Structure formats: structure tokens, C-alpha cells
Amino acid sequence: MSKMYHKEKSIQLKSSASALYNNLSVLRIAPRCLTYFTVVHANVVNMVSASWDGLNYSHRQLQSKEGNVATSSSLIMQAAWCVLPSRDLLVLTSQKGIQMYESDGSIMVYWHALDTPETPTAKAVFARGIAAVREKYICVGVSSGSVLVFDVPSKGSNITLSEVLEEHKEAITDMASECSGNLECIADLVSADDSGLLCVWKSGEDFQLLNKIPGFDTSCSSVKLWKGTVIAGYGTGQIRLYEGVTGILLAEVNAHARWIYSLDIAPFTGLLISAAEDSWVRVWHLSLTPETNSVEIEHMYNECVTDTQICGARFCDGDGYAFAVTGYDLSEIIRYTQA
Amino acid sequence: MKIYSINHRLYGINVQKCSLCYLIFMARRITSSARSSKSAPGWLLLAVTWQPREGLQTLIYSAGSSESADRVFLLTACDCSPILAALHPSPERMSTRTLPLLFINLGGEMLYILDQRLRAQNIPADKAKKATVADWLEEDRKRVMNDIITTMFNKKFLEELFKPQELYSKKALRTVFDRLAHASIMRLNQASMDKLYDLMTMAFKYQVLLCPRPKDILLVSFNHMDAIRDFVKDTPSILSQVDETNKQLVEIYTPLSGGEFQLIRQTLLIFFQDMHIRVSIFLKDKVQNSNGRFVLPTSGPVPYGTHTPGLIRMFSCSGEEVRRMQFRDGGNYCGALREGSFEMYGDRVIKLGTNMYSVSRPVETHMSGTSKNSSQHTKVNTTPNPLAKEELNLLARLMGGLEVQKSANTDSGFRVNLFATDEEEEEALISRPDELSYDVINIQATKDKQTNAELAKIMGEFGEMGEPASSSSSKGDDLLAMMDGL
């Protein structure tokens, strides 16, 4: 069997990746033939812009912020691009709050401070879990279990907190919005937490809870929503597929030998990528049969990143032609393209 | 304890008070063009607190306040001479329950290493009063271990340690372990202390990284605690302290969820990020590569609660399994072992955290440079301080660290070398790469009688301080100069 993917030239980073869930975000800018990558290192976000011809790389670093201080030592939990019809924003979530930047990281357009207690409490406080929903919402999760819904205008910095969703009791781990582009899908957003609970939402002036899918006492660290199907990765190394609105379990895969850290979907082809602490990156293929409400999941490819606990894996394009990987203590983004 | 926020310049210290307490204060450096003289740089005092000393002097560390303090300073006194040390604000603060685990596991590794070195080292047999050399060796080794363990499990210190708080910075934690290593009659030179700390941290990094489940970090901690209990099993008073701590660990940590443990683990991994020091025993056992990175096997038992990879199951709407497939996972995994015990006593099953050293397997490190993206935490302040005086390494003397005068304190202990020979130890100190230096203790005190009286007076205004200090200390100090030099 010939290899489906082969390794490309890696992109060097200014500092190594931290061991955080979903620690890689990718933004493809077709008109400029550029791809942006972000990787979190403690209190800094490393941003690299790579030209498609592989000749030009430029780096930028963004720091966490707190209060009136421009730079902070508070740790960043996640960085991700939110793609909305009118604009793309780069969102950083940290122990102190939420920062939103223009997509190239040049200007911060919004800062939201979390309520942090005066003295440290036993339960940590932080924001984690980022998703852009429909035309104008950016949703961010919080360690208390709340989901903050921000209303984003088509331009400018007049971003407002429009709603706080309180369904989760444990810290939010990841969130995802429907990525198939199909406007007929009822479910718009799925949120996951440390207990493995999944909440499925419909967006609007008031977000509506469609379903609560209970966990099985295991953290769900990464989640995706595609064609109404929730794809969830767990600390036990399992991947589960649920029908979003009904909560029916469609498939279960004993995919990894360690904690899953990242999932991604290529919406045009249904390719799924999973990455875990066990050093493996696996590519799967999903096909949905709406008539029978069933799913087929087929294993396509394995890649072992030797001696590395992987913390981020993303497709670089909507077809899944290329993907990128980050690992704890690694100062590079490893790339693979289809052979 | 009272904390004062004062926004004026710090000019003086109460030397007498310092012999009873620690003065901890946070300050921001003022960069003004109008600097009147070299000996009076600008520091803006942000907050001040006095902390009482307890028995063997627990070091209480105040994290920086929300105003950005450039430095946190610790002031103490020995023989009426002030000693100043700089601690730095801690950058790692994710999980607030991480510090006790970090301290106990690093402490455990330290004890394993010291135990091995004490057994291996030939101690000059000039202690004629002992019956046999062998008796002396055994007795003193036990005494050293007991002294260190007693300090480590000091009630007051542990109380402070177990409060939810932000992680100490690397430097502050290193200072704590320096003190711990010297809480007995044993002495370590700078090079040996550096090496000891390298080994401790790399060993624990390895254990954290290779833990099958995040929750297993607690089992690793229990392995260390079990071994510590074994070291002091013949001394009931210390044993009860250790048991108390073990109980606390069980109470605080067993209720935590897997997700919360993963957060603790992620916090620890950030603390250990970019450390790739090569350890000889790891290289020999092939658990570490020559580039300093640990080997992560893709074989062996899966963690408890995980299935071996390979099975795909698909279901119908009614919940029936309709299809089952296997995929090739590329690894060589087998089923999980039974779960280790989280009780006070029990089989932990996991081997991580048990003692891997023995007399026949010596501990060495190779000073390989870190990767080119080495974290800024290991940056070293290399600006020489023209005001330093040779004999004034007071904090070190207080802690019994570096040897200043060989003639003094002949009965106060024996030196332990973590290297094979004295020459090797000396060589290691000289050749240690800059980026791996632990710039922890950096003290100087200077004479400046002119400002001394004024200094003391103003300091007396801080309240809770009794009478202002007289300029009785002949080794007076320009505190500002001291701070500036750190």
C-alpha cells in the first residue's frame, strides 16, 4: 500500500509548542497565496505566515494581556481563527480573559476580562474553546462551564457580549460550529467539557439548546460538527460519532492509546484527522447516509511522529490535501501533503 | 501579616528586625534620566510584608501583585548583617494545585540521588571518635536523610505549600531546594548542587511525560512518598509527619477528575518546557535520546480505562451494532495492567517514581546546550556587580552553601560531591553553559555609612517595627545599591 501522505519541509517556530489541547490553528488566505499558522507557547502565541511557494515565511508573536498591563505572564490556553462571512478574527483565550485581533494579528480589536478572584482558588480560572458561529457570533468557553456568546459586527471593534450559556458544570475543553457550509443543518454549535458532556446548540438572538449528550466520566478534549454529526475525541483515546440533534451514537472507534489532543475535519471530502499523546496522527474517512441516518468511518492512514506527544493537528485546506502537526517541546510545524 | 502599599522610595532597613523575620517587598525599577548618583538608583516600592521565621526558616514566597513588579526581594539578616536575595515573579500559573506535587516529587528524586551519593562516596575517616568508619558512615547518612526529610515535611512550610497558589518561578523553587539540600550537615558545592537539580528536574519531567494517564501522576507521587516513608521508618516522629502529608495528598487529590489532572500535568509540562539535559542513566537505559528528548514507546500496556487501538464499531438508530471493523494501528499495544492503589498503602503498579539509582549506577549529566529556542527562564544576568565583596556571600553562609573560608566551621559537616572526583566537579562549574546556569542566589552588601542613619529612620516609619535600627551594623548597606545589583 503506497503512502497516502508524505512529509514536507517543516516550518520553524520561534518557541516550542506547549502541551495544550488543539494547539494549532490554520487560516488559508487564497487570494494572497498564504497560509497562517498559530501555535501557543505558555503566554505567547507564535504566528507564522507561509507563502504557498514555500519561499517566504514571516513570524509574529502575540502576548497574553491582563488588566491595564500590555503584556502579561498569564498562560494562553488556546488561539484560533474565527472565520465569519465579513471578516476573520484571531481569538486568544487565557487565564485572564479573551483577546480578539484582526486576522493578521496586527491590531487588537476587543478585550474581555474574566472574573478572576483576588486570591487563587482551588479551581483554576481560564477561558478555553473557541468557535465562530453563523454570520456574526463568536463563542468562547470558560473554566466554570459557561459559554460566552459575542456579537461581532461586520467591521470595527464594537463587539458585545450578547449571551452567557450555562449548561455545563465542568470546564469547557473545546467547541465547534457546523463546518459543512450546509445552511439546512439545524445544529450550529457543539460544546464539550471535562466530564465528556456534549451540548448541541442552535444559534440566534437567544441560543437554543437542542440536546445534551452525556459523557462517560472521561474528558472530551476535542470536538467537531459536520453535516449535523458530532465527532468527539476523548481522554481514553476513543473517538465517538453522534447524531447531533438526537444524540444517537453512530460509531465508536478505539483510535488511540493515549489522550486525544486534536481533531479536524476536511469539510469537502469528509476526511477526519485525529492526533494524540501516543505520537500517532491518524486519517479517517467519513461518509454519511442521511436516508438511513448512518455513518461509515474508514481508516485511511497512520503517521507516527517519533518521540512526540502531539498537541495539534489540522488540515491546511478544505479537501484535506495537506495537514500540519505540532508537538509538545517541538519548535516546528511538521507538514504532510498527499502523495 | 500586614501588607503595606507605599509609593515612595525605599531608603532603609531595620536590621534588628531582620534577624527575627524576613522582609519581603516588591518593587519596580524607575528609569529616570535624572539619576542623582550611581549609588541611589530609582526603585518604586509597591508592597511590603514581614514574615516571621519558624524553626528551620521556611521560605515564604509572595507572588507579584497585579501591578507589574519587576522584582520581588527577600531581606534577612545574619549576625546583624543584611542579606538580600531577589526572587522573580512566577510566570506559570495554570493549575493552582500543582505546587505540592511538584515539590514532593522533586524532593523525592533529590533524596534518591543524595542517598545514592552518600552510600557511594568515600568519606575521609578522620572522625576518630566513632567506633568504626562503617558505623560513622551509616549513622551520618541516616542523619542527613532524616534532617532533610524533617525540613521537607516541616508543618508550617507544608501548610503554606498546600494553599492553592501559583507555581513558584523556577528560581524561587531552586532556592527552596538549595535550602533543603543544606538542612543537614551535608555540604554541596555549586557545581554539585546544579547537577543535583538537573537530575531531579529531568527525572520528574520524564515521569510526568510518560505517565499513562494524567491521574497516574498521583501514583508517581505516592511512589516517592512510599520511599520517603521507608527512609525514615526507624524514626517515629518524622514518620508521623510523612504520614500526615500522605493523608493530605490523598484527601486533596483523589477526588479530582481526569480533566483536572490533565490540567495539572499540562501546567507541569509548561514548567519543564524546553529542558533537554542529557542524563547518563537515562541514556544508558535508552529512555532518552542523544538529543536529550525522551523516548516515547508505541508499544506496551495501554493506560487503565483505555482500549487497545484497532476496533471500529458502527451502530443503527436503535443502538444495535451493525458493523465491526479492525484497522491497523501501527503500534504494538497490549491490554492495560490493573489499576494502582490510591490509598495510603498499596501496590502502585506503576514503576515511575520509584528509585532507579543504586551504588553501582552512578549519576552523571552531560551539559548539552538546550535547543536554540531555549526558554527565557534560563536567561542569566551576566552584568558584573562592581560592589560585590568576596567575603560577603552571606546568604550562602547562612544556608551553609558555598565554602567561603575553609578554616571556619570544621565541625559543621562533610561535603558531598555529585561528580566522580573533585577535579571533575571544578571542571563542571567552569564549563557549564551560560544558558543552563541557575542564577538563584546573588548577594552583595556594601558599605555606605552616610546614608545609613537616614535609611534606618525612614524604615522605622513603616510601623510594626519597634525602634528604628541604629547604625550598629558596621557592615552597613546601601539597600538600593544591593537591589540594583541583583
Image: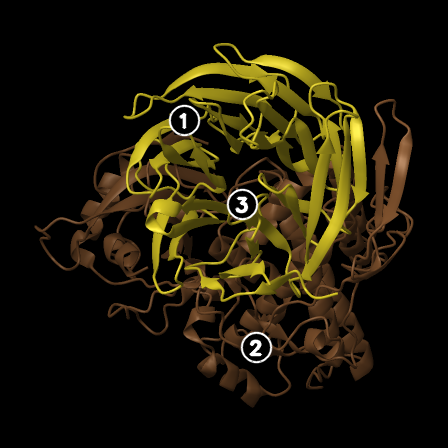
Chain colours: A yellow, B brown
What's the amino acid at mark 1? Answer: Ala
Up-down: is A228 above or below B58?
Answer: above
Up-down relation of residue B378 to residue B458 (above or below): below
User: In the rendered structure, which amino acid carries the disc numbered 3?
Assistant: Leu
Residue A73: name its quadrant. top left
Could you tell me how far apart the alpha carbons at marks 1 and 2 are, in whole angstroms?
A: 58 Å
Identify the residue at horizontal 45%, vertical 47% (top origin): B91
At x 61%, y 26%, the residue is A190
Where does the image place residue B473, in percent across and percent down from the top left?
31, 57
Mark 1 is surrounded, within 10 Å at the Cα level, by few (under 14), some (14 to 19) or many (20 or more) other residues, namely: some
Please report whichever mark, 2 or 3, sits nearer to the chain's N-terminal start.
Answer: 3
Quarter-wise, where is residue A89 in the image? top left
Q: On the rendered image, what quadrant is the C terminus of chain B found in?
A: bottom left
Front tag of 1 and 3:
1
Secondary element at image label 2: loop
Q: What residue does disc 1 label?
A: A113
Q: Nearer the viewer, residue B321 or A259?
A: B321
Observer able to see residue B55: no
Residue closer to the observer: B265 or B404: B265
Return the residue at label 2.
Answer: B410
For disc 2, the chain is: B
